[in-house]
Amino acid sequence: MDFRPLNDTERRQLITALRGNAEHDRCILMDRRDTSFIGTVDEVTDEEVISAIKSVPCHY
Amino acid sequence: MFQALVSYASQFARDLQRSLSGRQAVGREATEHGYSAKPDYMPLERVLLTDGVGRTLFEEYAEHQVGSRGEEETGWVLLGVREEREAIVLGTLPAGTERDAGVGHVQFNSAGQIVGSRIIRQFDRRLTILGIVHTHPGSLRHPSDGDLRGDSGWVGQLRGREGIFGIGTADVKPSPGVAVAYQPKPNMQCLDKLRLSWYALREGDKNYRPLPVVLTLGPDLARPLHSVWSVIEMHADRLDRLCRQQSGITFEVVTGKQEPALAVTVPLAQAGHTLRVMLEGKEGRYYWLRDGELLLVDPKESRVDRAVYLLLAELAATTN
């Protein structure tokens, strides 16, 4: 098992992912082979979706 | 009806496999480099419609044509997943009965679509707005100049700063016999007398470009909602307010007394306790689910958000 410390980039991404999980229920992706952290799901916020719906222009 | 398109199943399977292996490759790459799997959006090369979405568009377009407002334009907002070079459409939000429409325009009722998007996205938070489909009364199979003016400003807020636009026309000469869908061009689908032509528009583009469309097997996640869409529209603003103020609210379409109903579940602080609102037609029924026991309660209030808060206040008053 690899216990190497995370580098700065990896540590920053993991902290962001953990914060997203704690505050917004966002998923954290795990490599099924070695359980290492491989990023987050690209979730879309309600605000982004609702803003797009509200601003759908009239169509002709 | 879709036999011809479904006959392309092997092609779809290959496409799907390629798409999935592409995703696995992204995953492997992410693993190797240790970075987020967030896609780097490139211009769309094609749009994948699930057969559920395809059926919704053709079936509801056909129903619209023979309905009392058949002369008017209509349309749908498309929900789905945007990937690097393609988009998968997984849901359709109808223009709504309260749309503003005529023979030369359609403006969707966004209030119903906002609640619809909240309901659909409770299962998959990756779902985003991909574009829209709208119909033209004549045989103009391309978005109009007026469409371009509006869409040019709108697409900037979509993923990849690009939108998908479908144009429905009823200008196909039907063949005798059973109607079977076919694609005369890569960006065109025809069924009976109806045609859908697909385009993409990216921020800064001077015009739309034809977008190849491919059918794959899958649901229209929003189709069950279409049966209760008038209920959603009737209570849209108040349901949206409830969702913004109360966390954990869930929705489902259930069998009502006379017709499909929209069930809204509001979790309570105590484990095993929930409020359940059944909205069917103009009627609202309220239940308190308490440790498996279902109690019908009458808040004597027609506005759904006020009714829920009256019940919450009543329950708070009875709590020690």
Image (cartoon, coloured by chain):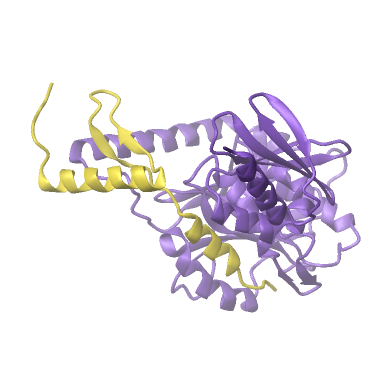
Q: Quadrant of the N terminus of chain B?
A: top right
Q: Nearer the viewer, residue B263 or B121?
A: B263
Asked which quadrant contains residue B30, the reply is top left
- Residue that extends furthest to the top in the rendered view of this protein: A1
Chain corresponding to yellow in the figure: A
In-front residue for pair B104/B118: B118
Q: Residue at x 26, y 37 (%)?
A: A38
Residue A11 seen from this side: yes
In the image, the chain rendered in purple is: B
Q: Quadrant of residue B198?
A: bottom right
Left or right: where does residue A14 sit relative to residue B247? left
What residue appears at the point 38 percent right and 33 percent down from the top-left corner? B21
**Which residue appears at 33% of the width and 38% of the height?**
A28
Work out which quarter of the rendered image holds the C terminus of chain B and state it.
Answer: top right
Q: Is residue B25 left or right of residue B114?
A: left
Residue B256, placed above or below residue A19: above
Residue B196 in sight in this render:
no
Residue B23 spot, x, y in % from top left = 37, 38
Q: Residue furthest front?
A: B320
How many numbered tags mark residues here? 0
Residue in front for this viewpoint, A45 or B157: A45
Residue shown at 68% from the left, 55% from the top:
B305
Looking at the picture, how far across and down is residue A3, in whole percent?
Answer: 10, 27
Q: Position of residue B165 (x, y in %)?
A: 59, 61
Q: Is B267 on the left or on the right of B96, as rendered?
A: left
